[in-house]
Image (cartoon, grey):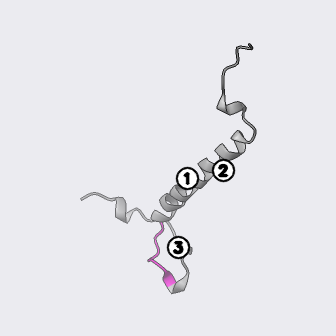
Amino acid sequence: MANRIFDVRRQRGFTTIALFSFVALYVPIAVLVVFSFNAGRAFPNGAVFRWTGIARRWAMCG
């Protein structure tokens, strides 16, 4: 018998599924981090994604 070792990285479609998984997991986190520095108030004039500038107000200690 051939001495083969199972390697999940050699399975068809592994790279595509892995990339999609990382994007699906980390892009929403990155969006939250970026918009947490938005200087605007929540839902200004009904626009959820309006960027009004950078603010570090919430991150300041004391």
Secondary structure beneath label 1:
helix
- Write down the quadrant of residue 62 in the picture: bottom left
Give the alpha-carbon distance from disc 1 to disc 2, as whole Å.
Answer: 9 Å
Give the foreground label among 2 and 3: 2
Q: Is residue 37 visible?
A: no
Q: Which residue occupies the extreme bottom position in the image?
A: 45
Element marked by disc 3? loop
Residue at image mark 3: 52
**Residue at x 68%, y 32% (from the top left corner):** 9
The part of the image, by quadrant, that contains residue 58 is bottom left
Tell me: residue 34, above or below residue 8.
Answer: below
Residue 32 locus on image (x, y percent): 49, 61
Residue 25: give its label. Answer: 1
Query: Can the viewer see residue 13?
Result: yes
43 in the magenta segment: yes
Locate residue 24, reporting x and y percent: 60, 54
Report, in whole angstroms, how far the alpha carbon at label 2 lies from the one at label 3.
31 Å
* Residue at the left extreme, as displayed: 62
Q: Residue at x 56, y 73 (%)?
A: 49
* Residue type indicated by callout 3: Thr
Q: Tell me if 9 is positioned left or right of 30 in this view.
A: right
Mark nearer the viewer, 3 or 1: 1
Residue holding disc 2: 20
Q: Residue at x 55, y 71 (%)?
A: 51
